[in-house]
Amino acid sequence: MEDSQELAARAERAIAASSRTSPTPPGQTDPAAREERSRRDPALVEAINQVFALFRLNFNNQYYAAFRDEEQLRQIKKLWLDSLREFPPAQILQGARSAIENSEFLPTLHRMRSCCEDSLQALGFPAPRQAYLEACDGGSPPEARSWSHPLVYWAGRDCNWTFLASASEAQSWPRFSAAYQARCAAVLRGETVPVVPEPPADRLEIKALEGDDALRQIARLRSENQL
């Protein structure tokens, strides 16, 4: 894993190579670069700037050793912006606070991504691992379960309940984690938390019955082609 100094050195080499090969004369802006900047979310750009300001305050000596000049810092910020754009600003800032509180060292980009992924609990959502285990035990029907948060249900449904129940953890955990992160990110960007739907009426009717009554109800529904 690269540390910040290695990342800075790689960015510096990329900048030098770019200056030798770019067809754009010095002091002029490539039109494609202008268009790219115009598509960027200003709130996301501001979040990255705030992250580096927090790092400068908390890792002062390490910060100036890693980011030796303004052009180098600009390129590294762009790298971080491109890598972290899937996270909303609130999650990025919470990830930076977590990195500062839990380490004495300036975080690498890889470490920062992990901190962003793990910051959901501090923002009011179940931790991803907790959500995954809950979704894997979804119940039947899952709509009848009392969920710790509606997004756990929706991420489980995005993945397919049968898949979660039958696939190995190596297959199901990455898929669920991505779906859950995407659902949480949408809410953090301002979308409304969707409500868990009511279970099907026939499933509710069976659930309320026990023993022989439940068996008779199942037989009746089968005869009516409802099961």
Image (cartoon, helix red, strand yellow):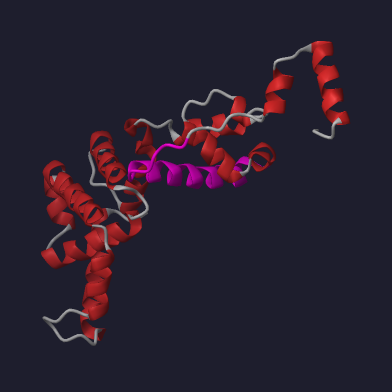
Q: Position of residue 60 (x, y in %)?
A: 12, 46
Q: Nearer the viewer, residue 227 or 162?
A: 227
Residue 105 visible here: yes
Give the residue at x 66% y 43%. Answer: 163
Q: What span is colored magenta in the figure?
A: 167-194
For the stretch drawn in magenta, the main secondary structure is: helix
For the C terminus, which image quadrant?
Answer: top right
Q: Nearer the viewer, residue 83 or 46?
A: 46
Give the residue at x 54% y 23%. Answer: 146
Give the residue at x 22% y 49%. Answer: 47
Residue 92 falls inside the magenta stretch: no
Is 102 on the left-hand or right-hand side of 166? left
Is 217 on the left-hand or right-hand side of 17? right
Is 21 on the left-hand or right-hand side of 167? left
Q: Nearer the viewer, residue 60 or 220?
A: 220
Q: Residue furthest front?
A: 224
Image quadrant in which you'd find residue 135: top right
Residue 183 falls inside the magenta stretch: yes
Q: Is residue 44 above or below residue 20?
A: above
